[in-house]
Structure formats: C-alpha cells, structure tokens
Image: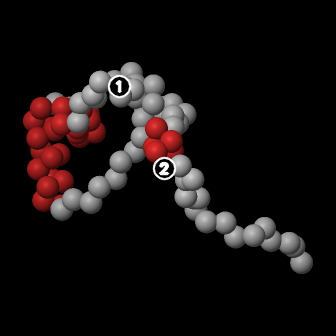
Amino acid sequence: MSERSPKRGFAARPADPERWVKATEPPSARTSDGAAFTARLTIDITTELRGRIKIVAFQRGVTVADMLRALLAREFPTTEGDTP
C-alpha cells in the first residue's frame, strides 16, 4: 500500500490580494508586442458576439487577441503612478 499525500486545492487564496495582483509572473513565450509580462484573461461571450469579433479582426487583418489587446489598452490606459 502506498502513502498518499494530503489532498491540496488547485490554488491557495493569496494572503495579500493587492500584492498578489501586482506581482510579476514569468514572461510568456507568446508576446507579440514585446511586452515582458503577460496574463491570460477569460471571459464568457455569446457565440454571436464571438463571430462578430472574429469577422472584424479578419477584415482589419489582425488577430482577435491583438485587436482586443489594443481595445483594452485604449479603454484602460495607464495612469500616473501605475507601472506598465
């Protein structure tokens, strides 16, 4: 009979959420704009909206990811005191 290690959760809650959010992560292998650090964001959208987004990205000759990154950067610019 083998001993089992105690069951652990997928991820522990951070003790200090503010510090956890601002913590740097290892650089991603996929950086199209030369940014040193990236983070993945997942959202739920309708299939219709997803289709419209893909069509517009194709018409503009860009990837969906690049188009949405630009949109988010425009909508949420860095403010004085923020670290890029």
Q: What residue is at 51 percent from the left and 44 percent from the top?
A: 20
Please report whichever mark, 1 or 2, sits nearer to the chain's N-terminal start. 2
49 lies above or below 66: below
Give the residue number, with chain letter if any, for mark 1. Answer: 81
Q: Is residue 27 left or right of residue 77?
A: right
Q: Quadrant of the N terminus?
A: bottom right
Spot occupied by residue 75 in the image (x, y as percentages of width and height): 18, 37
Q: Secondary structure at mark 1?
A: loop
Q: Amino acid at mark 2?
A: Pro
Which one is in front, 24 or 48? 24
Q: What residue is at 55 percent from the left and 58 percent from the top?
A: 13
Alpha carbon separation for disc pair 1 and 2: 19 Å
Colouring rule applied to residues = secondary structure
Contact between labelled residues 2 and 1, with CB atoms less than 8 Å apart: no
Q: Amino acid at mark 1?
A: Gly
Q: Secondary structure at mark 2?
A: helix
Q: Is residue 32 left or right of residue 52?
A: right
Q: Quadrant of residue 68?
A: top left
Outermost residue, bottom side: 1
Give the residue number, with chain letter if any, for mark 2. Answer: 17
